[in-house]
Amino acid sequence: MWVQPVTEGVKVHPLAARSVFWEIKTTVADPAFEKEAWVTRALVEFGECGFTIQDSATVYFCSPELAQGAAKLPTAPVAEDAAVITSLFADPGHPGLEAIVLDAAVMNLVARDFTAVEAFGYRDFAQARKLLGEKPPRIGLMPVETLEAAGFRVVRDHPITPRLRMELPPPFELLTVAAMDDLLARAMV
């Protein structure tokens, strides 16, 4: 198994292929069709918008404008300077895959010069289900502990669905030999 970008026709987690909670504010007749349409739109407007490990784990991320469904959460909106990781779907039988796809998303956003990434989490399964009308794993809502383990910190607290944020470092660029020689020459003066 390997991590690959989500594109049209790529195999994703079965729930990830049908969940449009984050992408659309209303209910739809054909969620799988709407999800494919959203992925196409996101690829055109935003670029890479997700990573998957076959049908075992999938993460989606985008600009706040492409995550209209986030408005359903009490800790919305996402800050204007941040990208948002909307959803993470992972089979419980493959522990650790959620960390791998989450890291892939974060590294992608670092390389694209984003300064921060935000995500919504849940603290209590039953309360989150009652608040949202959906089981958290069916919509890709992540446990707060998963996000905190990845380096996110709560920025807008809520007893059920806080919003978390991770400040991203600037992209790391390797020095060329010429640039290194130039720096050494200036340091010797």
Image (spheres, rainbow, N blue to C red):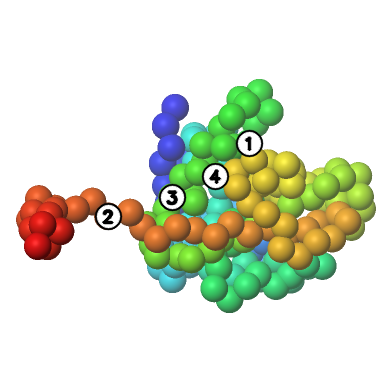
Q: Earlier in the sequence, mark 3 or mark 2?
A: 3
The residue indicated by pointer 1 is: 90
* C-alpha span from label 3 to label 1: 19 Å
* C-alpha span from label 3 to label 4: 9 Å
User: Disc 3 residue type?
Assistant: Met
User: Disc 4 residue type?
Assistant: Leu
User: Disc 1 residue type?
Assistant: Ala
- Rendered view: 92 above or below 42: above
* C-alpha span from label 4 to label 2: 22 Å
Location of residue 112 in the rendering, given as x and y in whole percent from the top left corner: 38, 62
Q: Describe the element under mark 1 as helix, strand or loop.
A: strand
The residue indicated by pointer 2 is: 173
Q: How crowded is mark 2: few (under 14 residues within 10 Å), some or many (20 or more)?
A: few
The residue indicated by pointer 4 is: 102
Q: Which of marks 3 and 1 is nearer the N terminus?
A: 1
Q: Which of 173 and 37 is in front in this view?
A: 173
Location of residue 82 in the rendering, given as x and y in whole percent from the top left corner: 55, 68
Q: Describe the element under mark 3 as helix, strand or loop.
A: helix
Q: Describe the element under mark 4 as helix, strand or loop.
A: helix
The residue indicated by pointer 3 is: 107
Q: In the image as oriented, which residue stretches furthest toward the front?
A: 189
Residue at (15, 59) in percent of width and height: 187
Q: Residues within 10 Å of mark 3 (few under 14, many from 20)?
A: some
Q: Which of marks 4 and 2 is nearer the N terminus?
A: 4
Q: How crowded is mark 1: few (under 14 residues within 10 Å), some or many (20 or more)?
A: many
